[in-house]
Amino acid sequence: MIAGLLGGVVGGGTIAAVTDESAQTSGPGASAEAAPTVIDPGSVADVVARVMPSVVTIDVTAGEEGGNGSGVIIRSEGYVLTNNHVISPAVAAGGQIVVTLGSDTEPRPAEVVGRDARSDLAVLRIPGVTGLTAATLGRSGSLVVGAPVIAIGAPFGLSGTVTTGIVSALDRNPSVPVDGGGASVIIGAIQIDAAINPGNSGGPLLDAAGQVVGLNTAIATVPGATTQSGSVGVGFAIPIDYAASVADEIIRTGRATHPYLGVSAATVTAAEARARGTRAGAIIREVDSTGPAAAAGLTLGDIITQVDGMAVNSTNDMTAATRLHRVGDSVTVTFWRAGAERTTRVVLQEQPG
């Protein structure tokens, strides 16, 4: 699965304006005062009213061009979690990053605390502020397929846009483009059908209680399309369990670390495995001689089928299963070699570069 990122495309977008030409009404009762709207506790409207103060719109400039995305306040001292791809154009060009709080009319400059291209996460800080309303972080690990979700962001620059849907699937590992070419993997992504579009990136995905369970990041791209389309009903969010862990590390140290096995691999599909009489998984094509896999005895041609009990059906699965651990963790790797299934213990090292 290839997914397109949701950061506002540098250069901006076109927004259609609608003019109301018939705002007045006539007839009996036209001048009567309208009854106040009652918001039911626990309704979508109630959740949005409580969470909206924690959602920000992010605008970036890169040279003479600009773009936009979204973010969510995770600490009252002004720390904002967003996607790396939202701010990376500005960082690369020495541009400016500003955020607009829901209650503000003027944007505020933001500084980059740290960013990480591999996880596509970044933390900003709004200097000189305290007492902001931080969002409540939930547990993405407790989500189930079919659960209702709410997305808030700034698609095409339309700040404070709310859409709803359900969790369509869990534990997806779609590839997304990264700075400088190539691709990375969204780890254990939450698949949703709530409409998200360019500009939604970095905005919160909420459960029915208003807790942040994910960070909206990408949408599926139509096969053969030459340009990024809008929502096609298949969106992906980074689970908050993983995103919060990376954000905490960035806030503590200014960077994020990632464990790796020390191999390059290719996917063996189920059909290929049947034809070869092997197993589906990730077949090792190269081994870093100084990496953890080599030290554990893994070699060329081994097909990795599990990492610490998590099934590996592709190279993306292998990457995702590995990155859910920490540098220094010892994991059990199950692999297929010479017609038999075997296991070994691998002590994960930090991925270089």
Image: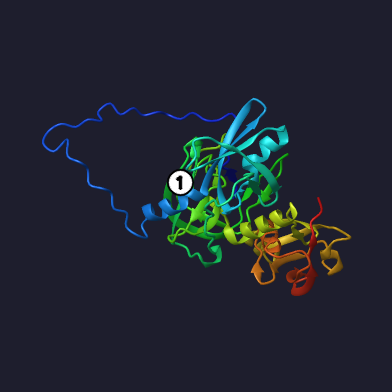
Residue 319, percent from left and from top: 70, 58
Q: Which residue is mark 1?
A: 195
The residue shown at (64%, 42%) is 85
- Residue placed farthest to the left in the image? 28
The residue shown at (34%, 27%) is 19
Question: Which of the 4 image quarters holds residue 201?
Answer: top right
- Which amino acid, mark 1? Ala
The residue shown at (72%, 57%) is 252
Q: Which element type, helix, strand or loop, lies under badge 1?
A: loop
Question: Which of the 4 image quarters holds residue 301?
Answer: bottom right
Mark 1, Cα crowd under 10 Å, few <14 / some 14-19 / many 20+, is many
Question: In the visual, does 48 lie left or right of 112?
Answer: left
Residue 231, percent from left and from top: 48, 43
Residue 282, percent from left and from top: 71, 60
Total count of labels: 1
Depth check: give the residue in front, 37 or 346. Answer: 37
- Residue placed farthest to the right in the image? 289
Looking at the image, residue 214 lies above or below residue 143: above
Residue 276, percent from left and from top: 70, 63
Regarding residue 262, the answer to whether it shows in the image is yes
